[in-house]
Amino acid sequence: MRKHLILFALLLALCAGGCALNSRSDRAWISKEKYEQAVGVYNKTGSLALLEKGLSESPVWTRAEINQAIYRLRKDYHLE
């Protein structure tokens, strides 16, 4: 019984640690529509800095969503 409690406590600690690490993430899933909106802004401006500035001024976008959009643009367009 004691071994089961120790195992359970260890698993609980691992799960809690994983949740804590995930909550500090600066990325968030964004919908296809939001990503396409970010692509449109990037195509018009040609600049990730201007894209970031424009999206950060919008109350619809969170910091994590902006980071994810920029991450995906860098990956898709082979930037930096």
Image (cartoon, helix red, strand yellow):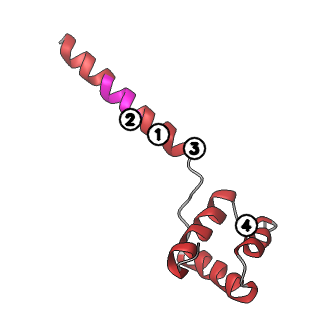
Q: Are marks 2 and 3 in contact (CB under 8 Å)?
A: no
Q: Are marks 4 and 3 in contact (CB under 8 Å)?
A: no
Residue 76 appears at what percent x and percent y?
51, 79
Numbered circle sitting on residue 60: 4
Secondary structure of the residue carrying numbered label 1? helix
Report which residue position mark 1 lands on. Answer: 19
Name the N-terminal-most of marks 2 and 3: 2
Report which residue position mark 3 lands on. Answer: 24
Bounds of the magenta span? 10-15
Q: Residue at x 69, y 82 (%)?
A: 42
Q: Residue at x 78, y 75 (%)?
A: 50
Numbered circle sitting on residue 49: none
The CA span between labels 4 and 3 is: 21 Å
Give the residue type at disc 1. Cys
The CA span between labels 1 and 3 is: 9 Å
Residue 4 appears at what percent x and percent y?
20, 19
